């Protein structure tokens, strides 16, 4: 998902969401690693946009594979295998299968699905959501807060001074205690900028050049990121 994009122009990334289905736990951790391998490089590339990271999983995934994604900053929505089977059962389809299920039996299940009207297919989707309502609402809530977020304060800290190094904590403490904070004779070092959003997200940046700092902040100009009036 992006903000300000068009068919001919790439916008600012707002969310990266990957989806996956697994029937057996033996493949779930590998799939989690595939997801993080696909999404995390995009996050690093677009870190200034602080995008939402999401994974929609269905089927059988171990708690460890889900925790692995969450520990890396992903919001995870998991539709367990049994709820998927129950959702298809609302239209008379037995969607369960195992390694012993023949290709012929699987083909019959697919045919029954393909024969359904659009209305009955939507019934399956609605049932799946209803069976996982609490988790769906949590996931959508987090995504919505990212999409609707706006800048709260922007903190700019111009730093002046010269770097000082000391061989021990004691000598460093002496330097701090004797440092004249009111002095402005030291040379400019850098701008530290912190952009804080109303949903708790934060973007930090450091610039030694004034033009670079201004260009960075210009990336966040626009009504969609301005505080609500």
Image: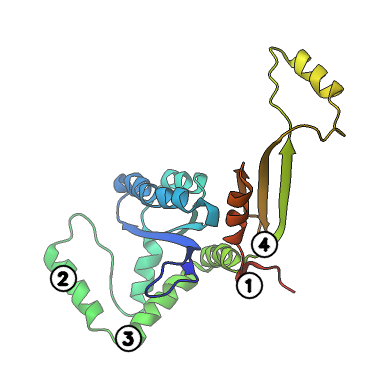
Q: Which mark lies nearer to you, 1 or 3?
A: 1
Gap between marks 4 and 3 measured at Cα: 42 Å
Q: Nearer the viewer, mark 4 or mark 3?
A: 4
| Residue 223's disc number | 1
* Labels 2, 3: front one: 3
* Tag 2–tag 1 contact (CB < 8 Å): no
Question: How far, Cα to Cα, is label 1 from label 4?
Answer: 10 Å
Measured in 3D between alpha carbons, the distance from the residue under mark 1 to the one under mark 3, in whole angstroms, is: 39 Å
What residue sits right under mark 3 in the picture? 118
Please tell me whether mark 3 sits on a helix, a strand or a loop. Answer: helix
Question: Could you say which quadrant of the image residue 146 lies in?
Answer: bottom right
Q: Name the N-terminal-most of marks 2 and 1.
A: 2
Q: Nearer the viewer, residue 68 or 108?
A: 68
Q: Is residue 172 above or below residue 8?
A: above
Q: Badge 3: few (under 14), some or many (20 or more) residues near its Cα, within 10 Å? A: few
Marks 1,4: beta carbons within 8 A: no
Tell me which numbered mark, 2 or 3, is placed earlier along the sequence.
2
Which label's residue is closer to the chain start, 4 or 2? 2
Marks 4, 2: nearer the viewer: 4
Q: Nearer the viewer, mark 2 or mark 1?
A: 1
**Mark 4, residue position:** 151
At x 73% / y 45%, what residue is drawn? 157
Q: Is residue 57 visible?
A: no
**Residue found at x 36% / y 54%:** 60
Q: N-terminal of the two: label 4 or label 3? A: 3
**Label located before the other in sequence (1 or 3):** 3
Q: Position of residue 75 (x, y in %)?
A: 51, 56
Q: Count residues near mark 1 (Cα–Cα under 10 Å), then give few for <14, some for 14-19, many for 20+.
A: few
Left or right position of 203 against 28: right
**Residue 89 place in picture, x, y as percent:** 34, 74
**Mark 2 = which residue?**
107
């Amino acid at each position: 998902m992006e903000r300000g994009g068009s068919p001919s122009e790439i916008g600012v990334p707002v969310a990266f969401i990957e989806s996956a289905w697994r029937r057996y736990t033996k493949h779930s951790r590998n799939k989690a690693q595939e997801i993080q391998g696909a999404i995390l490089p995009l996050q690093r590339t677009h870190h200034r946009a602080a995008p939402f990271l999401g994974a929609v999983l269905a089927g059988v995934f171990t708690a460890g594979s889900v925790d692995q994604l969450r520990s890396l900053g992903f919001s995870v929505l998991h539709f367990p295998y049994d709820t998927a089977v129950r959702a298809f059962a609302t239209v008379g389809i037995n969607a369960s299968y195992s390694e012993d299920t023949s290709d012929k039996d699987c083909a019959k299940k697919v045919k029954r699905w393909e024969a359904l009207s659009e209305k009955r297919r939507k019934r399956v989707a609605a049932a799946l959501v209803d069976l996982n309502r609490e988790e769906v609402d949590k996931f959508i809530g987090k995504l919505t807060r990212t999409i609707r977020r706006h800048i709260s304060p922007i903190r700019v800290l111009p730093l002046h001074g010269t770097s000082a190094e000391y061989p021990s904590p004691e000598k460093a403490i002496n330097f701090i205690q004797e440092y004249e904070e009111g002095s402005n004779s030291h040379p400019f070092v850098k701008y530290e900028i912190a952009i804080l959003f109303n949903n708790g997200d934060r973007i930090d940046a450091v610039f030694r050049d004034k033009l670079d700092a201004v260009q960075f902040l210009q990336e966040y100009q626009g009504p969609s990121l301005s505080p609500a009036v």
